[in-house]
Structures are given as C-alpha cells and as structure tokens.
Image (cartoon, helix red, strand yellow):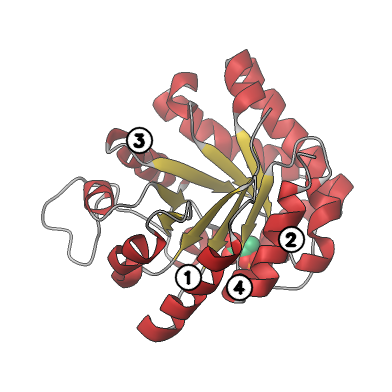
C-alpha cells in the first residue's frame, strides 16, 4: 500500500511572519492524519520552517536545487545545504522551472541525481502543455520526461523517489484534469516505471498537481494510481490545505 502524500508548493509567496503562521496552522491540524504532509517554503525560510515543524510530523522540502554540488555558481543552493538545514525532500522539474528558467530534461535529471546523492527525496514533476495535450502528445511528452531521469539514474535510482504529474494547463489556472484524465497519465507513468523495474512501478508514489482544492481533491485521490497531491495556490491557506490532506487520508480508509 502506498502511503498518500500531500505537498504544498508555496512558490514565491509570503513573509517570515505569514509563513510562520501558516506552518503553525498546519502543524496544529496534522495530529492523527494518516497521510504524509509536506510544506515547501522559499529557500530563505527553510531552516526556520524545519524548527517550527519539529516533532509535528510535517515534512519540509525545497522548491528546487542546484545540479552542482559546490563552486562558482552564484545564487544556487546545493542539495547538501538543503540537507544541512534539515530538509528531507526537494521538488525538481516543476513546470515553472522548466518553462521560465530553462530547466531541460537533462538538467532536471542532474538535479534529481544531485538530490539523491545528498540523501534528499526528489519529487520529480512532469506534465504536458496545453498545446501538447491538444496535439495528442501527452503520453509521449510525459514518457520522455520520465525517461530522461530513468536513463540518468537507472530504475534503482527511482527507489524512494516521488513523481508528480502536473499538466501545465492545470497549474494555477483553476482548470483541473478530470480524475479519468489524470488516472490515465498516472497509469502510463506507472507502466513505464514497471517496465524498468516491477517493484519500482508498484511502490513509487505518483502525485497529481494542478488546481487541486478541498472541493475536488477526494475525487482525484480516489483514483487507483493517484497517491496524493502537489498543491500550489490552495496550500497557502491552512484550512483549505488540511481539507485536501484529509481527502488524501480518506484514500486509506
Ligand atoms: C503547483 O504549483 O505545483 C500547482 C499544482 O499549483 P496550483 O495548485 O495552484 O495549480
């Protein structure tokens, strides 16, 4: 049984005070939830977030990581630094990094490798644009993005990692993939992983992301291959996010 996970990607939002209040709201509501819950604040708040989350069970992840380990890379943050401040997870390949900051499949694979090498759990995001969906290339695009990482690290390199299917057209748009649309892509990803290694295919958690809210979470998480969510906008409201976490926990019962 894959334990559900709900992760909040806070993106470039909040202040020290507002982020602290959000974390406190989350940790207060976590008790007794069977799902894993993670928050991904901006880099500068990570160390404080780790301290605030201590003993609550809330996982703290970063939104991105350098592909390099150290050196003359101004502005970058390494995987070892993230570990050093107590992060356990890191998002790689978010569509905003791919489309706005030029992260190619190869760079995403290098970031994934860097995360693994430092002992972080990578959360690998994949997903097609609207034009790609309308052109009927969704499966091919997602398979290519997954293959880039599989080729770089091998099937065993995926052990313990998390995938997130996030159709670009659904991120921050209020337009969600239907449960059936999402399930079809999740199934395809799982089949691709299983073809490389049966255990990895069965055990890897695949999250859905793209305008998930309290109102639509349960129907998405009810699908067989959707193991939780990666949440943007709705993760900035503690009550809304906790409602989503409860919907994921309901998947277990
Ligand atoms: C995201 O940024 O990963 C995301 C899914 O955003 P939203 O939930 O706002 O669509």
Q: Quadrant of the N terminus?
A: top right
Label 3 vs 1, first from the N-terminus: 1
Q: Is residue 19 above or below residue 63?
A: below
Return the x and y of residue 182 as percentages of the image width and height. 79, 47
Label 2 vs 1, first from the N-terminus: 1
Q: CA distance from mark 4 to mark 1?
A: 8 Å
| Residue at 35% over, 35% down | 116
**Extreme left residue here?**
71
Mark toward the viewer: 2 or 4: 4
Return the x and y of residue 105 as percentages of the image width and height. 47, 44
What residue does disc 2 label? 130
What residue does disc 1 label? 23
Return the x and y of residue 133 as percentages of the image width and height. 77, 53
Q: Secondary structure at mark 4?
A: helix
Q: CA distance from mark 3 to mark 1?
A: 26 Å
The disc at residue 238 is: 4
Q: Is residue 170 above or below residue 196?
A: below
Q: Secondary structure at mark 1?
A: helix
**Extreme front residue here?**
32
Q: Are marks 2 and 3 in contact (CB under 8 Å)?
A: no
Some atom of ligand 1 lies within 8 Å of the CB belonging to the residue at label 3:
no
């Amino acid at each position: 049984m894959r334990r559900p996970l709900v992760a909040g990607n806070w993106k470039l939002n909040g202040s020290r005070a507002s982020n602290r209040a959000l974390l406190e709201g989350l940790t207060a509501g976590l008790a007794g939830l069977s799902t894993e819950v993670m928050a991904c604040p901006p880099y500068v708040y990570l160390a404080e977030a780790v301290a605030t989350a201590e003993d609550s069970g809330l996982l703290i992840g970063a939104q991105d990581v350098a592909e390099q380990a150290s050196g003359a890379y101004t502005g970058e943050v390494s995987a070892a630094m993230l570990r050093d401040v107590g992060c356990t997870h890191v998002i790689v390949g978010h569509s905003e990094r791919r489309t706005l900051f030029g992260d190619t499949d190869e760079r995403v694979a290098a970031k994934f490798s860097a995360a693994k090498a430092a002992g972080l759990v990578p959360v690998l995001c994949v997903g097609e644009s609207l034009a790609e969906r309308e052109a009927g290339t969704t499966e091919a695009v997602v398979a290519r993005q997954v293959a880039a990482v599989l080729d770089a690290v091998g099937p065993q390199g995926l052990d313990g990692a998390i995938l997130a299917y996030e159709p670009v057209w659904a991120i921050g748009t209020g337009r969600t993939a239907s449960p059936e649309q999402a399930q079809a892509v999740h199934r395809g990803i799982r089949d691709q992983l299983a073809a490389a290694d049966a255990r990895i295919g069965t055990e890897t958690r695949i999250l859905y992301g793209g305008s998930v809210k309290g109102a639509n979470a349960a129907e998405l998480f009810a699908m067989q291959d959707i193991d939780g969510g990666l949440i943007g906008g709705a993760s900035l409201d503690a009550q809304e996010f906790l409602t989503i976490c409860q919907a994921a926990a309901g998947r277990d019962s």
